[in-house]
């Protein structure tokens, strides 16, 4: 046979559940506030590149994008990864020592006059 639950026991149980939920919601809110507060998406105005470049790259399929109303939007992770692949490194000079000097002096020789 079941024991009857009193109103006082029931209210204490609900108060415990409410405290637990409030604490867990507070923890989640604090974790989200401590995380990066910037949005996870770029549009043409907020992207690190120019707005025209952003729109052209999105139209060309350089990174996945979609439209929200009239705005073209893309995930920050995808745009930043695409920008990282676009980095250019200068080519090292092949000439050194005597070769560099010979090229320099060859460039100083006078040209033949035109006839």
Image (spheres, helix red, strand yellow):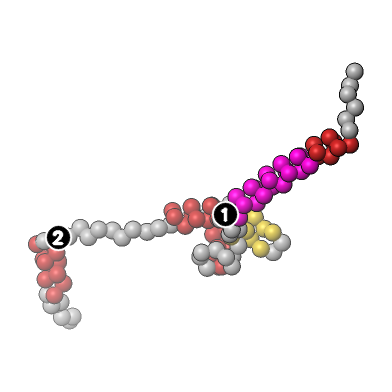
Q: Residue furthest top?
A: 1
Q: Residue at x 68, y 44 (%)?
A: 24
Q: Secondary structure at mark 2?
A: loop
Write the residue at 59% across / 58% down.
37
Residue drawn at x 57%, y 54% as measured from the top left: 34
Give the residue at x 18% y 80%: 114
48 lies left or right of 73: left
The residue at which mark 1 appears reads as 34
Nearer to me, 90 or 14: 14
39 relative to 112, above or below:
above
| Tag 2 residue | 96
Which sits in the foreground, 112 or 62? 62
The range drawn in magenta is 15-35
Picture coordinates of residue 12 (x, y %)? Answer: 80, 38
7, 88: nearer the viewer: 7
Q: Toward which corner of the image does residue 94 lie, by quadrant?
A: bottom left
Q: Earlier in the sequence, mark 2 or mark 1?
A: 1
């Amino acid at each position: 046979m079941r024991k009857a639950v009193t109103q006082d026991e029931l209210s204490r149980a609900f108060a415990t559940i409410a405290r637990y939920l409030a604490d867990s919601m507070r923890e989640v809110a604090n974790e989200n506030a401590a995380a990066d507060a910037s949005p996870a998406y770029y549009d043409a105005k907020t992207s690190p590149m120019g707005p025209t470049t952003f729109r052209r790259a999105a139209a060309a399929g350089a990174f996945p994008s979609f439209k929200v109303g009239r705005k073209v939007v893309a995930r920050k992770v995808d745009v930043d990864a695409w920008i990282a692949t676009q980095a250019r490194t200068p080519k090292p000079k092949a000439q050194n020592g005597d070769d560099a000097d010979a090229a320099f002096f060859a460039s100083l020789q006078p040209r033949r006059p035109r006839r």
